[in-house]
Image (cartoon, rainbow, N blue to C red):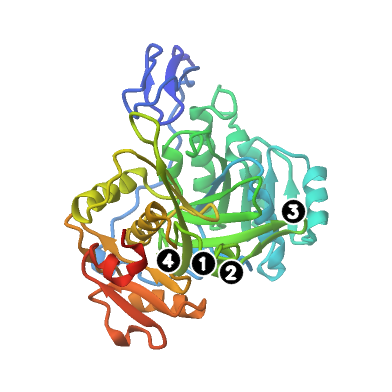
């Protein structure tokens, strides 16, 4: 068999080139090309007899039974549990708690059958030490310290486990590919064989993946395309909170979120995330507003903090943490044009407390209120929450599911809520609605903010 000459391949998207390129023409990444050996020329693998097509009207509609992991937050983000034959990628920074979460899930439901936990990074002794520390030792969990994917697939087909966990996909390698572990070619081949295992033999497969310093899943972009669900596990090493969110899910919503707390005994789901996120809120502080947002099916109350100060720079700073910086720039432009505020000589900093990130237009009204409060150095009412989208004309626009937002605000002790005019009085009894049609209505609603 002949061998193809070495080529250069982008580690981000898999684009190939006969020479090294500083910038990838496929994804635009800089210094992402690495030299990889050419793959051996071999006969294509037999895929069996060709399948017969089925009419769409005759296709089977039966729902596959879900496999509950025993961790309510993980099941919710997955869309109700694991689907047999599915492949899930759990990505996160090293040390955030990916292995801890999956080890707890493996031992939480022993009645479901055996779980094959494949560790390509640690020995069985290291995994066992962590399991004893977490108190999740069970006879149903089978440990396999093996980096070769062919050996893992053979073991899984022999044991026929109910669940396969691979930690991590970037440290696995295939004997069919003459390349180092973690390379684009290896990750693609390893993922392909594990996907084939799940689709042909039926056990759900969970892959642990690392992320780059830019926060993206390491390896080729095709890794995210071949799996059925992508879950991101994030958090700060200086903070006990961990956030699990879905960015892709073929079997459920891709907007779900679960909040966990890391301790010496492992991860515990936070049942009331809103109460935790508002626990350290300072009443009567200028620049603080509470937004009612929805992540997937979960309504959340998030504190928005804004700091506005005079800038010594020719180009004032605009810093946004937890929200889109472009959205902040848009809101500042609307406030200056439609509400008469001046931001040209001021530094503006906006932060969502608790390390959460929100990409929902309902956050707009709370951000605008916090900015005006900080710029005038006058606090907002402590029992007032906000939700509403701000348009380019300064109008307050409607957002979805207002009743659920009001219900969550009332449950957390808020007596009133600033909402768009479209929200009716019977949306949620027991909480006062302060309807706003335009940004200029903030002055009428909160006279203390008037300069």
Crowd class of label 1 (few under 14; some 14 to 19; many from 20; radius 10 Å): many
**Are the residues at dot 3 and dot 1 in contact (C-beta closer than 8 Å)?**
no
Residue 225 or residue 178, whichever sits in front: 225
Horizontal side, residue 96 vs residue 53: left or right: right
Nearer to us: label 3 or label 1: 1
Cα–Cα gap, marks 2 and 3: 23 Å
**Are the residues at dot 4 and dot 2 in contact (C-beta closer than 8 Å)?**
no
**Are the residues at dot 2 and dot 1 in contact (C-beta closer than 8 Å)?**
yes
Residue indicated by mark 3: 142
Nearer to us: label 4 or label 1: 4
- Expressed as whole percent of the image width and height from the top left, the position of residue 20 reads 41, 12
Residue indicated by mark 2: 72
Q: Is residue 280 among what the camera can see?
A: yes
Nearer to us: label 3 or label 4: 4
Cα–Cα gap, marks 3 and 1: 26 Å
Q: Earlier in the sequence, mark 2 or mark 3?
A: 2
Q: Earlier in the sequence, mark 4 or mark 2?
A: 2
Residue indicated by mark 1: 76
Crowd class of label 3 (few under 14; some 14 to 19; many from 20; radius 10 Å): some
Q: Is disc 4 placed on a helix, strand or loop?
A: loop
Q: Earlier in the sequence, mark 4 or mark 1?
A: 1
Cα–Cα gap, marks 4 and 2: 36 Å
- Expressed as whole percent of the image width and height from the top left, the position of residue 367 reads 37, 57
Residue 128 or residue 197, whichever sits in front: 128
Horizontal side, residue 289 vs residue 449: left or right: right
Residue indicated by mark 4: 380
**Are the residues at dot 2 and dot 3 in contact (C-beta closer than 8 Å)?**
no
């Amino acid at each position: 068999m002949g061998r193809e000459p070495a080529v250069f391949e982008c580690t981000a998207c898999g684009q190939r080139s006969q020479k090294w390129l500083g910038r990838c023409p496929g994804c635009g990444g800089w210094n992402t090309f690495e030299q990889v050996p050419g793959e051996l020329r071999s006969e294509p693998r037999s895929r069996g007899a060709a399948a017969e097509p089925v009419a769409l009207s005759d296709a089977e509609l039966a729902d596959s039974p879900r496999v509950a992991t025993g961790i309510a937050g993980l099941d919710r983000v997955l869309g109700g549990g694991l689907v047999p034959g599915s492949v899930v990628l759990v990505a996160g920074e090293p040390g955030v708690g990916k292995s801890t979460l999956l080890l707890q899930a493996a031992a939480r439901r022993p009645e479901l059958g055996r779980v094959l936990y494949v560790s390509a990074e640690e020995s069985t002794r290291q995994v066992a030490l962590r399991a004893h520390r977490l108190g999740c030792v069970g006879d149903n969990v089978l440990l396999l310290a093996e980096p070769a994917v062919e050996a893992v697939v053979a073991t899984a087909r022999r044991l026929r486990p109910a669940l396969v966990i691979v930690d991590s996909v970037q440290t696995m390698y295939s004997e069919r590919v003459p390349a180092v572990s973690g390379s684009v070619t290896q990750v693609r081949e390893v993922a392909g064989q594990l996907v084939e295992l799940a689709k042909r033999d039926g056990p759900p497969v969970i892959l642990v993946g690392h992320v780059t310093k830019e926060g993206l899943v390491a390896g080729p972009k095709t890794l995210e395309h071949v799996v059925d669900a992508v879950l991101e596990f994030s958090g700060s090493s200086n903070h006990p909170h961990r956030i699990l969110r879905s960015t892709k899910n073929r079997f459920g919503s891709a907007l779900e979120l679960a909040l966990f707390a890391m301790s010496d005994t492992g991860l515990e789901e936070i049942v009331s995330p809103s109460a935790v996120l508002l626990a350290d809120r300072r009443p009567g502080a200028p620049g603080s507003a509470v937004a009612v947002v929805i992540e997937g099916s979960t309504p959340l109350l998030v504190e928005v903090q804004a700091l506005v100060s005079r800038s010594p720079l020719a180009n004032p700073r605009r810093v946004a943490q937890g929200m889109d910086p472009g959205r902040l720039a848009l809101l500042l432009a609307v406030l200056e044009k439609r509400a008469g505020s001046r931001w040209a000589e001021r530094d503006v900093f906006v932060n969502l407390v608790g390390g959460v990130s929100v990409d929902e237009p309902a956050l707009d009204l709370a951000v605008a209120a916090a900015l005006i409060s900080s710029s005038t150095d006058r606090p907002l009412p402590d029992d007032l929450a906000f939700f509403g989208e701000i348009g380019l004309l300064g109008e307050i626009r409607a957002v979805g599911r207002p009743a659920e937002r009001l219900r969550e605000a009332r449950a957390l002790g808020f007596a009133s809520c600033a909402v768009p005019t479209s929200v009716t009085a019977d949306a949620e009894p027991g909480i006062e609605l302060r309807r706003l049609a335009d940004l200029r209505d903030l002055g009428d609603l909160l006279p203390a903010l008037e300069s």
